[in-house]
Amino acid sequence: MSVKKVEDSEAIEDLPEDFEPYVKRWFDERFEKLTPPQKYSFELIHENENSLICSPTGSGKTLSAFLSILNELFLKGDEGELENRVYCLYISPLRALGNDIQRNLEKPLEGIKSIAEDMEVDMPEVKSAVRTGDTPSKERQKMLKETPHIMVTTPESLGIILNAPKFKEKLKKVNYVIVDEIHSLCDNKRGTHLSLSLERLQQMCENEITRIGLSATQAPIKKIAKFLVGYEDGEPRPCNIVDVSATKNMDVKVLSPVEDLIHTPGDIVNKKMYEKIDELVKDHVTTLIFTNTRSATERVVNNLKNLDPEFYENDIGAHHSSMSRKKRLGVEESLKRGELSVVVTSTSLELGIDIGYIDLVLQLSSPKGVSRAIQRIGRSGHKLDEFAKGRILVMDRGDALECTEMMRCAKNSELDKVRIPENCLDVLSQHIVGMGCNKKWGVEEAFRTVKRSFNFRDLKREDYDKTLKYVAGEYASLEDQKVYGKIWIDENEEGKRVFGQRGKMTRVIYMTNIGTIPDESAYRVNTRNGRFVGTLDEEFMDRLTKGDIFVHGGETYEYRYTRGMKVYVDRCPEKAPTVPSWFSEMLPLSYDLGKKIGKFNKKVLSRMKEDENAAGWIKRNYYLDENTVSSIISYLDEQYQYVGTVPTDSEILIEKNFESDKLNLIFHTIFGRKVNDALCRIFADLASKMLNSNVGIVVDDHGFVLICPKEDLDVKELIERVTESDLRKVLKKAVRKTELMKRRFRHVAARALMILRNYKGKQMSVGRQQMKSHFLLSACEDIDEEFPIVKETYREIIEDYMDIENASEIVDGLKRDEIGYRVVETDVPSPFAHDLVIQSQSDVLKLKDKKERLQRLHKKVMESIEAG
């Protein structure tokens, strides 16, 4: 048996016959019937079969995973076989979610115990507990004597307890592992870390572990199932996929506060937006509002309080990751008790923390992805038979276009595909150290164990050997940088290579530096003559290259260089910014949704060419109010009238827009920021060679701009050069000297235990880490351009931060003529380019000025259309 979806015929209508009578009675008294996921999972888990459960919020999937396990523990207790060890590990991505699960697990245990007492049955005691970084030492010690049968933990804490000298003995017969919200782990290095931990756990276990994955949004589902269960002998382990994600109805609509998003003054649009929010909040019992940034969350709360102080003063809460844990918990509890009418959040309430009854989710601006939209909207109508009700309020025409297709996809459960990182050599380095701390490993045995992880199934032997060599400290030049070996490698009496822990400090180093989440800090900004300007966050620094212009505190600065965590700049009031300062907080549009928006544009374009009623077709097939339909039609029609086309998934529009001192080459590529970032840097690198001059860049989700000297550029030749190039090679060269490379190398080096964030009770500041990484990067490159830590830094940037895979797909499409391109010259940028052009200047334009600039551009376009 391989990875397969369960058949309808495999569903059951009642609990399995051999469930304990008191478990059956408790369930029957609490629930009318089995929910869709329970019809499959109760039996599958009872039979110890790996299962990936995909079902909506409120469908009982947590109980789907737990009830069969509880029943098995009760059966063992009845037979006197319930040992003092861990039987089930419940892995949660969030500590708060773990605490929530623990509370929700205690309720059924108490309920079942009450029923058992009523039936005069002596129910075995099943213990559960949370173990995370917040767990006090006293409680951890207590767990050695009274071990929880069900342990709720996080990926990082699992990595620690696998190496805890005494407690790891309690894990040697684990029967079940549940991975909650698996979609939020598998697409990042926390998931990579977890995947290796699970294979190490399996290797030390005496029995086969049953793995259970839970999530409301998963795609591609078979790939996520393989991530969950891993590989054996080069093939994925068996896994049943229980996909009942489409069993919850959704009531969704895109709203616009005004009919004309261009000419209505900005303050009026803003006023109408808050009036609409106020109306929706007061029409519902409890509303959850999602913004896309933490700053927007605070702004919305403040403005609603000003709008109606009497109603909102004690009836609204904010919730985001920058708030203290105490404040966040207070808001969660108030929401759960029904004491708040509205809570505004950024991303921190996306996952399944129990927050009680929500009857409306309101999203302000595009959430940038279908899966994210479904996850957020799914927080409403918590019961399965209730509608999940969601409204998206859009503030510009680009947003309206984006959300039109997004809501159709959400309604039809067409999810974005997650991309799972592969062969992360920094995570591998960390685990090799952890493995060596536990026992002597055969080099071959360890390689086989690592390759059982989905993330490392294709790991090349050369990369494995080089990583071992690095961890073993076989490079004298790294010792000069105080990077020492953490394992030894030798031959045993049988002539086989083995490795193990080197030195007593290695275990302490591993336990105090474990994990994949990097330390972050703000950079101090100074002018080169010594004046302090302020601070910049690290994500913003990823965008900067020498000569970039940005705004801070209302003034314009040119970036010159960085030393450690200090940024040096020159004031340049006469220059326009090239990097918008809000960039770091923005969520990227998913590639899958971008392509679907392109397809939507193509469908509308064909109807416009045939003089069909495009507005009527949109109304019939999409979930929009009249204002939004009007905005979209005018947006697409003006673009078509002005340049004769709109950008689609199969045709890229390229505008040559000459200004007084430069050429703006505007590429309309609706493929999301990750893809566009890769394309933009590749095109810019090759264009700069053609022009023998630096080329500036501006990038967003819908396209990018190459800012060139004022001389013509042969676009056809540029595209030919791109299609004939080794894209990875060009992109690696383009990012080599950037702040992005320096910062990401620091992150990778810290994960690989090359930079020790914690050592002998002292914490290394981010500034010192950055200084150390500067010298280490040069030292590693001198050893080998393919040195594991350098190689992983490039891989992380090119594959995770950007999206070279799908960027390559676009370039291949151009090469095979499956994707065409059209070049037009414009005196004024086309309507689809307005947001991109204005965003590049957004920091020197106040909100009112932005609106006026947009209106001026729009007026010139309309004058050109009318002039014919």
Image (cartoon, rainbow, N blue to C red):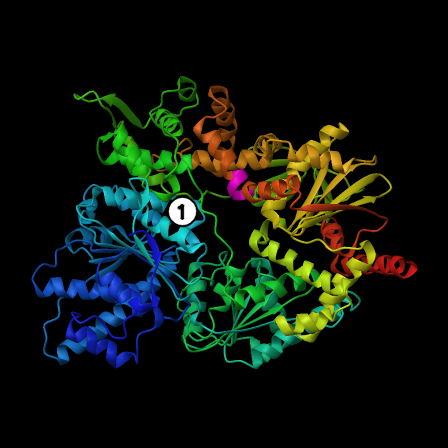
Q: Position of residue 279 (x, y in %)?
A: 62, 79
Q: Tally the marks.
A: 1
Residue 576 falls in which quadrant of the image? top right
Q: Position of residue 569 (x, y in %)?
A: 68, 36
Dominant secondary structure of the residues highlighted in magenta in the image: helix
Residue 476 visible = yes
Residue 344 visible = no
**Residue named by callout 1:** 190
**Residue with the most extreme top position:** 476
Q: Position of residue 624 (x, y in %)?
A: 64, 72
**Residue with the most extreme left position:** 80
The C terminus - image quarter: bottom right
Q: Is the residue marked by circle 1 packed among few (<14), some (14-19), or many (20+) residues within 10 Å?
A: some
Verify whether residue 798 appears in magenta: yes
* On screen, residue 167 above or below 312: above
Verify whether residue 613 appears in magenta: no
**Residue with the most extreme right position:** 867
* On screen, residue 833 above or below 570: below
**Residue drawn at x 36%, y 26% as measured from the top left:** 465
**Residue drawn at x 48%, y 76% as measured from the top left:** 387
Q: Position of residue 54 (x, y in %)?
A: 39, 62
Horizontal side of 587 relative to 147 (left or right) equals: right
Residue 370 falls in which quadrant of the image? bottom right
Q: Which residues are magenta?
A: 797-803
In this view, the residue in front, 736 or 520, is 736
Residue 564 falls in which quadrant of the image? top right
Circle 1 SS class: helix
Q: What amino acid does circle 1 point to?
A: Arg
In this view, the residue in front, 810 or 697, is 810
